[in-house]
Image (cartoon, rainbow, N blue to C red):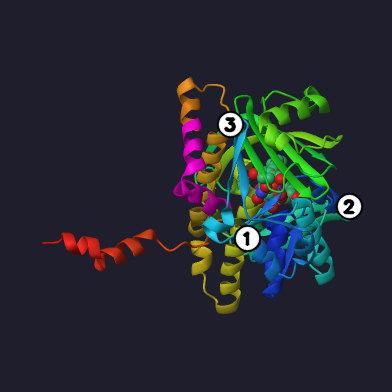
Amino acid sequence: MRTQVAIVGAGPAGMVLAHLLHAAGIASVVVERRTRDYVEGRVRAGVLEQGTVDVLARLGLDGRLRSEGLVHTGANLAVDGASFRIDMAALTGAAVTVYGQQEVMRDLFDAGEARGLAVVYEAQDLRLHDLDGAAPSLTYRTPEGPQHLVCDYVAGCDGFHGTSRRSIPADVLRTFERIYPFGWLGILTDVPPAAHELVYASHANGFALASMRSATRSRYYIQCGIDERPEDWPDTRFWDELCLRLGPGTAGGIVRGPAFEKSIAPLRSFVGEPMRWGRLFLAGDAAHIVPPTGAKGLNLAVSDVVMLAEALEAFYAHGTSSGLDGYSARALARVWKAERFSWWFTRLMHRFPEETGFDRRMQLAELAYLGTSRAAQTVLAENYVGLPLDPPPVSTSVAASLSAPSANLRGMCP
Ligand code: RFL
Ligand code: PHB
């Protein structure tokens, strides 16, 4: 079998890329290890940046998103029980949309079937070949037998534990990593959310987050020990601790119900550089991981593949490879900013085992500053709603202001 772009992994990165390439008239085959039900069933992200919503709209995938997604113009921070609101829309002119990754995947798969996208499920023993040659290929096994797929380019969208990143030679790939000494215990429950908007809580006992999936489904998280297990947290213990950390204002709105999903996710920051080797291009979690505090993972996967699709389109339409050559640097520039934000927000909101009284005072002082400073809130808000794909360099405006000095500066000149 032959195609133009072989895509490894049918998560958000792989499926959005397949749709983008289809819209550009570029052929692709998506090769996924699991079944569609398994990929769609994974309970993960909940918050979409405006840019992600715009991409899904451009692809005609926003029907349910528009009717069922919850547009949030702000979010709340609670500090030892007392909360304040950050008005993202007033500060940035943008908002986020709460719409679960499970719904995004369902929309991507349904439209993929309707549009005839080629997706191979249950592909086992995937191997990548000749990535640094002119005709790379994939081999794998399906229930029908061994398969061989030859292509021009390979998009490695197979998540953190996938094969693609590991195919880059060790003397080429540089990795940067931070593992956090705690996890997030998350539950899903069919009760109305505690509040209209998300509440991120920093409490002496640890972090908590009140989120949601719909008007009747809530998603809650609490920081837990890295060695703890979901069984250590029967529902009553979880609800009591969640209410304590969120504080009386939010806890008053909590409706308790049975948790039908309860799992613990470790927290990690990770970047692999470069995101291209030969004819292999990494995108999404295959190249980088962020702790979920900033809600950036799925959004980064989408911005990566937008850049990759643009580069592939320029190559197939005009024969120019500068976009492909610049893909890694362009994507990493945005990735590192999201890494910084997610790391900063994680450090600010969680209790660390090794922290001192001084460290906690620093967190509380920064949170108090955030509660009262428009400048500090703007920094948080513009990162949370999503940075632009290619921000103009600040030096442009500095240079502009230097070449046209303000009245005050002119007045000071001799
Ligand atoms: P995925 O989703 O991991 O998909 C990779 C796919 O590749 C397949 N695969 C293979 N296929 C073939 N052959 C192989 N050898 C393969 N190896 C792997 C896998 O089966 C899988 O289907 O990566 P992708 O597409 O890059 O998407 C990344 C996002 O899923 C991830 O970043 C987000 O879920 C992270 N995340 C959040 N992101 C947000 O933007 N907003 C949020 O609010 C948010 N909350 C979260 C999160 C992640 C969480 N967990 C559990 C990690 C909350 C949590 C708790
Ligand atoms: C979620 O609803 O799953 C969610 C929301 C915000 C985050 C992380 C996860 O920062």
Q: Residue 143 carries which label?
A: 2
**Looking at the picture, how far across and down is residue 399, in whole percent?**
30, 64
> Can you tell which quarter of the image residue 95 is in?
bottom right
In the picture, measured across the screen, residue 402 lies left or right of residue 134, that is: left
Identify the element where label 2 is drawn: loop
Q: Nearer the viewer, residue 144 or 344?
A: 344
Between disc 2 and disc 1, the foreground one is 1
Q: What residue sits right under mark 3 in the picture? A: 350
Label 3 or label 2, whichever comes before in sequence order? 2
- In the rendered image, the residue lying farthest to the right is 144
Count of numbered marks: 3
**Looking at the picture, how far across and down is residue 62, in whole percent?**
74, 66
In the image, the residue with mark 3 has its CB under 8 Å from the nearest atom of ligand 2? no
Q: Residue 251 carries which label?
A: none
**Looking at the picture, how far across and down is residue 328, in whole percent?**
52, 57
Q: Residue shown at 78%/22% (left/top)?
A: 232
Tell me the kind of residue under disc 2: Pro
In the image, the residue with mark 1 has its CB under 8 Å from the nearest atom of ligand 1? no
**The magenta stretch spans which residues?**
364-384
Q: What residue sits right under mark 1 in the picture? A: 50
